[in-house]
Image (cartoon, rainbow, N blue to C red):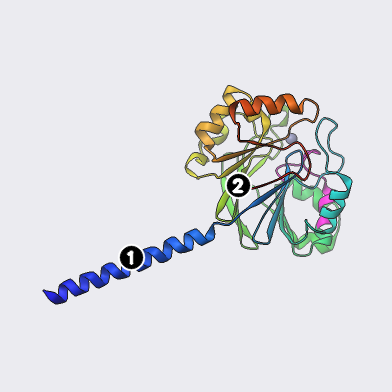
Amino acid sequence: MNLVRKAVSRLFAFLLTAALFVCGAAAQEKATVEITYIANEGLMISSGGKKVLIDALLREGLDEYQRVPSDQLEKIETGRAPFDKVSVALVSHFHKDHFDSASVARFLENNPQATLASSTQVVEAVRKEQSEKIRQRIREVMPDWKQRVQHSFDGIEVTFLRIRHTHQRNYGVHNLGHIIRMGGKKFLHIGDAEVLAENFISLGLDKEGIDVALLPFWFLISDAGRAVVNDQIKPRHIVALHIPPQGAEMWARQIKASYPDAMICAEPMQKRSF
Ligand SMILES: [Zn+2]
């Protein structure tokens, strides 16, 4: 009897130690993650010395949306601080206000540690830039509409989601969403996604535990958009992107009315830590 009791108490002690160890490891995994707004839907996400760029390499842009300030663009393309040692550049889609193929090619040439991972349309445009040096660091990722695939870059896990672009004329545009895991947290970026429940239903983002949703502002200013955010994404924090500089204050007021704690990205190089 004594032996059995001893064995049971040892087993409990072992299980308790194991549980504490697992909890400790999970707690350690959480680290501060910093977001730096670059322009339009472009950001750098960094944590523990690792960095990811998304929609940050654009040049010509579109008149109604923010462009990357030229001094910052030079630093990004040439890999100078704070944009040095970027592991992966992600691009939601090939529109000019999100992407420039020559800019991406120059970035890859100057950043031998970096990979580009994006859709067929983006990858084909960059391949046309004809630099042999960068070809091996271009990864084509192309899930079907409403599907997801996962890849890892320098230890950073990224889930690619295919989400349809806004407006019927753009349905042929390959628009990718991304779940980027850094510092034990999940960051969701959805490109120029259309406000449409069907776009999100099969992705199950509500069960994903999204910490920070990086969203085009049109999801935050209409009932239909907010329904997607609140019911289908359920993020802990919201960052508002793609805000036209003209009318930015008005949009900011509307966004804050529903999401008072949202980070409103209006000034390049704005930062927030999560
Ligand atoms: Zn677009």
Across and down, in percent, residue 81 comes to: 80, 58
The magenta region covers: 91-107
Q: Does residue 131 lie above or below 217 as drawn?
A: below
Front in this rendered view, residue 117 or 64: 64
Where does the N terminus fall, quadrant-wise? bottom left
Q: Residues within 10 Å of mark 2 (few under 14, many from 20)?
A: many
The residue at the point 84 percent across, 49 percent down is 72
- Tell me the residue that label 2 is attached to: 187
Percent across and percent down for residue 57 are 80, 47
Residue 245, relative to residue 131: is it above or below? above
Ligand 1 sits in quadrant: top right
- The three-letter code of the residue at mark 1 reads Leu
State the mark number for residue 197.
none
Residue 153 in percent (x, y) is at 65, 60
Query: Cβ(mark 2) to ligand 1 < 8 Å?
Result: no
**Vertical comparison of 152 with 200: above or below:** below
Instruction: Tell me the residue that label 1 is attached to.
Output: 16
